[in-house]
Image (tube, rainbow, N blue to C red):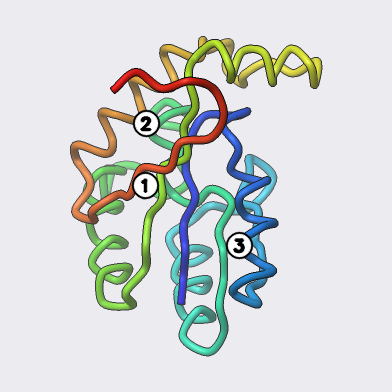
Amino acid sequence: MLYILEGCDGSGKTTLAKFLSKILDAEVIHCSQHTPNSDRFFRDIVEASKTRNIIADRFCYGQFVYQEEKDRPLATPYLVPALVALHHLETVLLGAGAKVIYVTAPTEVIKQRLAERNESLIAGLTVEEVQSRYNAIRGLSLLPWVEYHTGGELDV
């Protein structure tokens, strides 16, 4: 089984991944700017999830939040736009039964966590911009996303 955790830096993805990995006896794969993040890379993870539980601490969606289209490894320049490539990959994810979990927290809580870790968001983005971009890609996704809130008081 493949569980994909997406969300802003500081939202609690890695903490949730560690917790779930113990419960599900799952391997955690952290996809970052240092991993290939190509279509083949993600399809290999999906294939591996057919024989063992995998939790992806980020997956393909972060490219649409943190990178410009020309810089997204998922796209094939001049051949396949990134959104088309994403939808092709999502059909594979659907077939494999992958689950996407959007990990979020109140904006101020995320900002506090980042400050405590002396971190800032890549590409000079604000927390609000990242959250807005995640909401946009969630709206374009073919897969249903489950929302998981961490920390802080929530307005209902």
Which residue is more in the foreground, 70 or 5? 5
Residue 78 coordinates in the image, percent (x, y): 29, 42
Q: Residue at x 27, y 49 (%)?
A: 79
Residue type of the residue flagged with mark 1: Ala
Q: Is residue 128 left or right of residue 83?
A: right
- Disc nearest the viewer among 2 and 3: 3
Q: Closer to the N terminus: mark 1 or mark 2?
A: 2
Q: Residues within 10 Å of mark 1 (few under 14, many from 20)?
A: many
Residue denoted by label 3: 20
Discs 3/1, front: 3
Q: Do the CB atoms of the residues marked 3 and 1 lie less than 8 Å apart? A: no
- Number of numbered callouts drawn: 3
Q: Residue at x 52, y 29 (%)?
A: 8
User: Quick check: 3 above or below 124?
Assistant: below
Tell me which label, 3 or 1, sits earlier in the chain.
3
Q: Which mark is residue 75?
A: 1
Reply above or below: 123 against 84. above
Q: CA distance from mark 3 to mark 1?
A: 31 Å
Crowd rating for badge 3 (residues with CA inside 10 Å; few <14, some 14–19, many 20+): some
Picture disc at residue 69: 2
- Please tell me which residue is depicted at 61% across the width and 13% down the height of the picture: 111
